[in-house]
Structures are given as C-alpha cells and as structure tokens.
Amino acid sequence: MTLAWRAFVFPAAVLGLLEAWARTVGQGSDAVAPPSRAVGAWLGALGDGSLLSATGFTLGCAALGLALGFAAGVLLGTLLGLSPRAARAGFLSIELLRPIPSVALIPLAMLVFGFGLRMEVSVVAFATFWPMLVLAQAAARQVDPRLLEVSRALQLSAAQRLVKIVGPALVPRLFVALRLGVAIALVVAVTVEIAANPSGMGYAMMIAQQSLDPALMLAWLFWIGVVGYAVNAGAVLLQRQVARRMGAVEDRP
C-alpha cells in the first residue's frame, strides 16, 4: 500500500503549489484558477448533466472510430504480413497516406459528413487505422512459418488458417496495438472537438475558455486526464484477463 501511495505524491504536490500560486501571485488572473475552484466547477458540471453527456459523446466517438480503425487495420495488416507480394504492391500507397496528420482530414470530413458523430468517427478511424495496420503486419510476419506449412499440409482453408493458427498467434501482440489505439482515439476525438465539432469534452473545454471561466476549463482538462487514465487502465485489465485465459487454456493437458 505504501508503494501505491507514492504515485500520488508528485501530483498532489503540483496541485498544492498551483493552489498556493493561484491564491497569491496569480490571484485575480483570468487564465488560471485554484484547483479547489476547479473541483467546484466539476461538481457543477456533474450536477447539471453536461459532464456525463459530453463524456459519453467523446467516448462513444472514440470507441466507434477505434473499432473501425482496429478492424480494418488488423485485417489489412494481417494480409500484408502473410503475403509479401501484397506488401510490396501496397507499400507505396501506405507510405504516402500514413504520414498525413489526422487533423488535416477534418476539412474533408466536414465536407462529406458535416458536423456531428460521423465526422468525428471518420477522423478517429483514420488516425487509428495506420498504427493498427503497421503493428498487425509486423505481428503477422512473426508467425512461425512451420505452423503455416502444417496448415497447408492439413489442407486447411484460408479462413481456417486465419482462425485456428494466425489469429491465436496475433492476439498477444494485437493487445499492444489496442492499448496504443485507445490513447490515440481519445486524443484525436478531443482534438476534433476543440478544432471543429461542437460536441463532447473538447468543445466544452473550449466554451469554458471562451467564456473566461478558467475554473471550468481546468475542471474539463483534469477530467479528460482522468478519463484517459481510466480507459487505459481498462485496456490493461482486459489484456491481463485475456492473457490469463489463454495461459489457462495452454496449461491444460
């Protein structure tokens, strides 16, 4: 328990220093508010329902975009990893499209989908697709070639090879990709809301800033950090549960 509490020492010290600075040197500033006032603003947002609705919208967009990007990236990455010919054919296209920043896609997404959920989901899906593709391709290349030779000797179909041999070999490595994708999805979703989409946590923080309400702005900033931590912790827990189940299966005679 002592070791667990050590992780909170530095954040608590930073918050204490910020509280002291805001109430002395920075008193009356329109840019910074004491953390205690930010807590009050957070409770107010929780009470009027804006906190939960904005959080739900952002998390929903991030989850949908991640699901689309993950599914498409893993499927295409697995194909490229198992087929050197396909990898060579798609190399130039991938290397040209992959460096495009996801935020640069916002104007195009607005023209196609307008404001709202579909626009944000499309940008998140684009952002998460490329790391999923690269990591899935690398994982597929590391599948033991002898397993693939055995599957061909057993005359397994392509779908059967994917489900019975390639899939189980990819799962541990794909959870690394999933944890990376979770972080990217949340960051991109909030960025889209700050830049263009009038919904979600990012937009709420921008409105607080434009209303010269630093306490509420800091409340949203801290809350986004808490949500990100909780989402990452959930992904780690899921990874451990799946790894434990796979290990239990492998240990059986």
Image: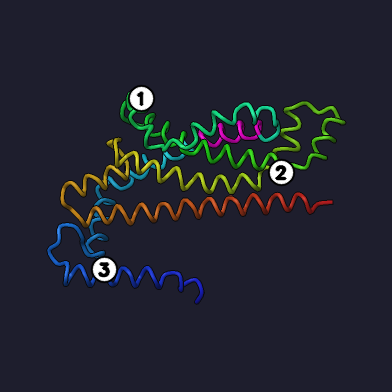
Q: Residue at x 35, y 70 (%)?
A: 12
Q: Is residue 221 above or below residue 141?
A: below
Indicate which disc residue 142 carries: 2
- Say which quarter of the image contains residue 144: top right
What residue would you read off at disc 3?
A: 18
Q: Classify residue 219 as left or right of residue 148.
A: left
Indicate which disc residue 113 carries: 1
Residue found at the far right of this picture: 153
Q: Amino acid at mark 2?
A: Gln
Indicate which disc residue 99 carries: none
Judged by its main secondary structure, the magenta piece is: helix
Separation of residues labelled 1 and 3 (CA atoms):
42 Å
Q: Classify residue 190 as left or right of residue 147.
A: left
Q: Residue at x 26, y 56 (%)?
A: 218
Q: Residue at x 27, y 61 (%)?
A: 39
Magenta residues, start to end = 68-80
Q: Badge 1: few (under 14), some or many (20 or more) residues near its Cα, within 10 Å?
A: few
Disc 3 element:
helix
* Circles 2 and 1 in contact, beta carbons < 8 Å: no
Q: Badge 3: few (under 14), some or many (20 or more) residues near its Cα, within 10 Å?
A: some
Disc 1 element:
helix
Q: Classify residue 20 as left or right of residue 133.
A: left
Q: Amino acid at mark 3?
A: Leu
Disc 2 element:
loop
